[in-house]
């Protein structure tokens, strides 16, 4: 087995929690995701995704999404409930 090392980094607690939850849903841990990221950087000699400054439309959509999430609105138990809400225009 190859030698391993430890990386220590400071991450906002909420970002860490949300990322860990998202990664868990994908069957990954924070450690495995960082390992995948760094492996791609080492192999490709580039960050494996585009880094862009969002335009005004994107920033407005992000703010709206944050507001909806903070109200815990637009949450559904299943896809049928979501589709019904989309079709009727309700949250």
Image (cartoon, rainbow, N blue to C red):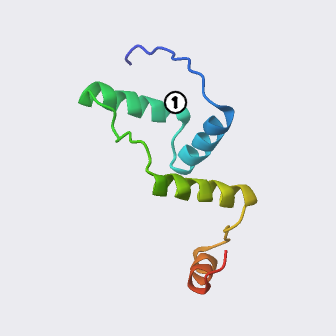
Q: Quadrant of residue 46?
A: top left
In terms of depth relative to the viewer, which is nearer, 60 or 7? 60
Q: Quadrant of residue 67?
A: bottom right
Q: Quadrant of residue 87?
A: bottom right
Q: Which residue lies most toward the bottom here? A: 88
Q: Position of residue 17 (x, y in %)?
A: 65, 39
- Rendered-image quadrant of the C terminus: bottom right
Image: 73 above or below 51: below
Q: Which residue lies most toward the right here? A: 71
Which residue is painted at 38% across and 27% down in the image? 38
Looking at the rendered structure, the number of numbered marks drawn on it comes to: 1
Q: Position of residue 24 (x, y in %)?
A: 57, 45
Q: Which residue lies most toward the left here? A: 44
Q: Is residue 43 left or right of residue 67?
A: left
In terms of depth relative to the viewer, which is nearer, 67 or 84? 67
Which residue is painted at 61% across and 38% down in the image? 15
In terms of depth relative to the viewer, which is nearer, 4 or 90? 90
- Rendered-image quadrant of the N terminus: top left
Which residue is painted at 54% across and 37% down in the image? 29
Which residue is painted at 44% across and 47% down in the image? 54
For label 1, the residue is 31
Q: Position of residue 25 (x, y in %)?
A: 56, 51
Q: Position of residue 81 (x, y in %)?
A: 64, 79
In terms of depth relative to the viewer, which is nearer, 50 or 80? 50
**Label 1, residues with CA under 10 Å away: few <14, some 14-19, many ≥20:** few
Give the SS element for disc 1.
Answer: helix
Image: 37 above or below 1: below
């Amino acid at each position: 087995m190859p030698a391993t090392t430890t990386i220590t980094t400071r991450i906002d607690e909420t970002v860490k929690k949300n990322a860990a939850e998202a990664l868990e849903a994908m069957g990954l841990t924070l450690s495995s995701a960082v390992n995948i990221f760094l492996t791609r950087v080492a192999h490709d000699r580039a960050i494996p995704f585009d880094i862009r400054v969002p335009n005004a439309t994107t920033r407005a959509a992000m703010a709206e999404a944050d507001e909806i999430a903070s109200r815990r609105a637009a949450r559904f138990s299943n896809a049928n409930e979501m589709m019904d809400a989309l079709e009727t225009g309700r949250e």
